[in-house]
């Protein structure tokens, strides 16, 4: 198994120079010699003076690990040291940001700004700049030549799938942090805690505020596990607890972990099903090689899950017919996974090339977010599931295949919701490296 360095401090310099090279090269496509990237502006609730949680522009955090400072700007001019215009607005209602500190600052020229007009006075000739950000009105007012040019974005997004060593280190550390929370969440589940309590113990264990997590954690007891993006945290535990599906991540320097585990109370049918999905998840990860297409892996996963449905006598059909007739979709209606990095569902999963051409998801599997070929340095999730979703089961009940289904067993399983097992995989020279299992294994000892 390939060792992953977690020395982000010494890996950052090389990361930054690769990022700068990537942007410089892409700028040629829009005839610009520099790029201005805002961190983003705070947004306020309607008729309210409280802002929504700040979410940084992912292009901004590609360059440096700041995700909590609005109205800052990165200005990169080709061939020059990048400049950070760092917002230190003076304001007695809020604490101004502290001076930047840490392993990355030596690589930057940093200037404090107090206002947007401070920033506009420092950007030089706007006619030679591209702008990447949401604040397009501001960019127009400042006379910037190219605003979110599609060629530039396509090229950068495409290459973002290939992670630097620094990024892989951040993703491994994000996994380590998330796994420490998953362990505490499992304990809380076994103690009979509510969804709300499990969520808060998870957040405390990973030392994140909710808004620091890369996505809202899914903490689903019992039949809630069948709701793919279940969004509530019930404060009362159910009278009888059967299962927990927890899909929860963590953030390291702006990089996301995205991990799901499913647990059963005691041994029995549902635990056996979890074990079977786990075995098939590990088996498909073992098959991953550069050159394979991710959509084919998704199809192979459907065949494997069909095997589970047959072995457990949930469906009495052979695997091929189950996949061909799309019966497996009832039990696994989302894709096998997605690219992972600065965003949980990272960009360009459907992009065929840096030009922006796309390979759409197969008609049969419209939710598949990744149709690229597996290549070295990609990081993605592998997250098969097997769910008992009443809405989809009702459709199956009306179909010609209803007679092949063991409805008694299904009724027994519906209260357990569903199973998802999600790991984060880095495709490296010696094969797929499972960042999530690395973390669980390391924390066992
Ligand atoms: N946490 C969302 C997902 O797994 O894609
Ligand atoms: Mn995921
Ligand atoms: Mn997830």
Image (cartoon, rainbow, N blue to C red):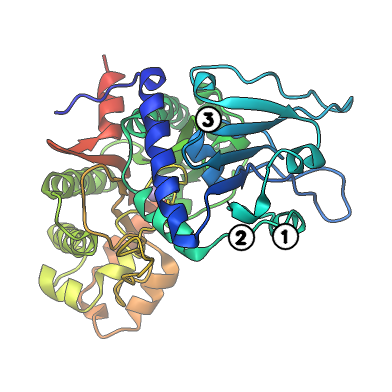
Q: Is residue 418 visible?
A: yes
**In the drawing, does residue 117 fall left or right of residue 111?**
right
Vertically, is 306 above or below 273?
Answer: below
Observer-nearest residue: 445 or 370?
Answer: 370
Alpha carbon of mark 3 to alpha carbon of mark 2: how far? 24 Å
The local crowd at label 1, few if under 14, some if 14 to 19, many if 20 or more residues have their Cα within 10 Å, is some
Observer-nearest residue: 431 or 317?
Answer: 431
| Residue 208 disc label | none
The local crowd at label 2, few if under 14, some if 14 to 19, many if 20 or more residues have their Cα within 10 Å, is many
**In the drawing, does residue 352 fall left or right of residue 173?**
left
Does the residue tagged 1 have its C-beta within 8 Å of any atom of ligand 1? no
Alpha carbon of mark 2 to alpha carbon of mark 1: how far? 8 Å
Element assignment for label 2: strand
Tell me what residue is drawn at x 88 percent, y 28 percent: 93
Residue 137 position in % (x across, y down):
74, 59
Residue 211 position in % (x across, y down):
62, 37
| Foreground disc of the pair 3, 2 | 2
Observer-nearest residue: 321 or 141?
Answer: 141
Alpha carbon of mark 1 to alpha carbon of mark 3: how far? 27 Å
Q: Earlier in the sequence, mark 1 or mark 3?
A: 3
Element assignment for label 1: helix
Please give the residue where the numbered disc 1 appears in the rendered image: 140
Residue 318 position in % (x across, y down):
10, 71
Please give the residue where the numbered disc 3 appears in the rendered image: 65
Q: Earlier in the sequence, mark 2 or mark 1?
A: 1
Does the residue tagged 3 have its C-beta within 8 Å of any atom of ligand 1? no
Tell me what residue is drawn at x 35 percent, y 50 percent: 159
User: Which residue is at the far bottom?
Assistant: 400
- The image quarter containing residue 354 is bottom left
Please give the residue where the numbered disc 2 appears in the rendered image: 147
**In the drawing, does residue 436 fall left or right of residue 70?**
left
User: Residues at badges 2 and 1 in contact (C-beta under 8 Å)?
Assistant: yes
């Amino acid at each position: 198994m390939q060792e992953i360095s977690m020395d982000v401090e010494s890996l950052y310099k090389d990361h930054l120079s690769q990022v700068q090279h990537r942007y410089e090269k892409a700028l040629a496509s829009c005839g610009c010699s520099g790029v201005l990237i805002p961190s983003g502006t705070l947004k306020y609730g309607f008729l309210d003076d409280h802002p929504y949680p700040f979410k940084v522009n992912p292009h901004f955090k590609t360059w440096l690990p700041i995700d909590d400072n609005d109205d800052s700007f990165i200005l990169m001019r080709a061939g020059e040291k990048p400049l950070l215009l760092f917002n230190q607005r003076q304001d007695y209602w809020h604490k101004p940001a502290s001076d930047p500190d840490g392993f990355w600052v030596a690589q930057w020229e940093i200037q404090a700004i107090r206002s947007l007009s401070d920033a506009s006075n420092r950007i030089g000739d706007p006619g030679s700049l591209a702008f990447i950000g949401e604040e397009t009105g501001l960019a127009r007012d400042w006379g910037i030549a190219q605003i979110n040019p599609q060629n530039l974005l396509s090229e950068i997004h495409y290459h973002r799938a290939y992670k630097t060593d620094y990024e892989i280190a951040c993703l491994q550390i994000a996994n380590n942090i998330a796994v420490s929370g998953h362990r505490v969440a499992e304990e809380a589940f076994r103690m009979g805690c509510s969804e709300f309590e499990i969520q808060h113990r998870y957040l405390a264990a990973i030392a994140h505020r909710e808004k620091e997590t890369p996505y809202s954690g899914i903490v689903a007891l019992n039949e809630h596990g069948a709701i793919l993006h279940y969004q509530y945290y019930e404060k009362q535990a159910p009278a009888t607890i059967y299962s927990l599906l927890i899909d929860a991540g963590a953030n390291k320097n702006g990089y996301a972990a995205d991990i799901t585990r499913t647990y059963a109370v005691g041994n029995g049918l549902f635990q056996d099903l979890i074990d079977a999905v786990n075995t098939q998840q590990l088996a498909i990860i073992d098959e991953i090689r550069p050159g394979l297409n991710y959509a084919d892996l998704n199809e192979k996963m459907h065949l494997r899950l069909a095997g589970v449905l047959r072995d457990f006598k949930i469906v009495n059909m052979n695997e091929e017919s189950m996949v061909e007739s799309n019966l497996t979709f009832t039990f696994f209606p989302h894709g096998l996974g997605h690219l992972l990095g600065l965003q949980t569902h990272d960009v360009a999963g459907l992009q065929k090339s840096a030009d922006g051409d796309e390979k759409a998801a197969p008609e049969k599997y419209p939710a598949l977010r990744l149709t690229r070929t597996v290549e070295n340095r990609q990081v993605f999730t592998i997250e098969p599931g097997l769910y008992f979703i009443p809405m989809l089961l009702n459709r199956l009940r009306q179909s010609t295949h209803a007679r092949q289904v063991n409805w008694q067993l299904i009724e027994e399983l519906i209260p357990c919701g569903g199973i998802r097992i999600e790991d984060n995989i880095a495709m490296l020279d010696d094969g797929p490296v499972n960042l999530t299992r690395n973390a669980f294994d390391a924390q066992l000892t």
